Amino acid sequence: MLQKTVTLKARPRGFHLITQEILDNLPELSSVKAGLAHIHILHTSASLTLNENADPTVRVDFESWFDRAIPENAPYYQHTMEGSDDMPAHLKASLLGSGVLVPVRDGRFCLGTWQGIYLGEHRDHGGARKIVVTVLE
């Protein structure tokens, strides 16, 4: 078993491909013949998901849809002391989830041709985010 905490660079609000950043911080993965990698984010206002890695407009459309579906400044929010983007960020993170499970084969993530791991950064200034990667062989 391998477990490592990785600090991702700070990013603006939106959806960002982080597959390569994870791999760059996980050289130990190269020795894994077959296994599972569980990637978990240690925050409640950001999320992880798998989706299209080729066309960047997919990530723009994700952000546009979530911003319309979960607006800021809704009059029914009670949790407002941390800013207008905080409660919507918690809701978006809950809908998308805090982790992804990815097969590992021959030292690489076993992803489809067009799949990548996204960080959903739901705050305007979320800062660096920490993830825990656990690889089971």
Image (cartoon, helix red, strand yellow):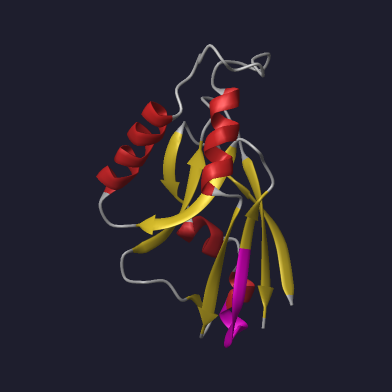
- In this rendering, the answer to whether 57 lies above or below 127 is below
Q: How many marks?
A: 0
- In this rendering, the answer to whether 58 lies above or below 13 is below
- Whether residue 105 appears in this view of the structure is yes
The spot of residue 28 in percent (x, y) is 64, 74
Q: Nearer the viewer, residue 97 or 14?
A: 97
The spot of residue 59 in percent (x, y) is 34, 44
Q: Is residue 34 part of the magenta span, yes or no? A: yes
Q: Is residue 78 part of the magenta span, yes or no? A: no
Task: Residue 123: name its quadrant.
Answer: top right
Q: Which residues are magenta?
A: 30-38
- Whether residue 9 appears in this view of the structure is no
37 sits to left or right of 15: right
Identity of the residue drawn at 69% across and 46% down: 42
- In this rendering, the answer to whether 98 lies above or below 121 is below
Task: Residue 86: name its quadrant.
Answer: top right
Identity of the residue drawn at 73% across and 67% down: 3
The spot of residue 107 in percent (x, y) is 53, 80
Q: Nearer the viewer, residue 83 or 124?
A: 83
Task: Residue 14: name its quadrant.
Answer: top left
The spot of residue 49 in percent (x, y) is 48, 54
Quarter of the picture containing the N terminus is bottom right
Quarter of the picture containing the C terminus is bottom right
Residue occupying the far front of the picture: 76
10 sits to left or right of 1: left
Identity of the residue drawn at 30% across and 39% down: 61
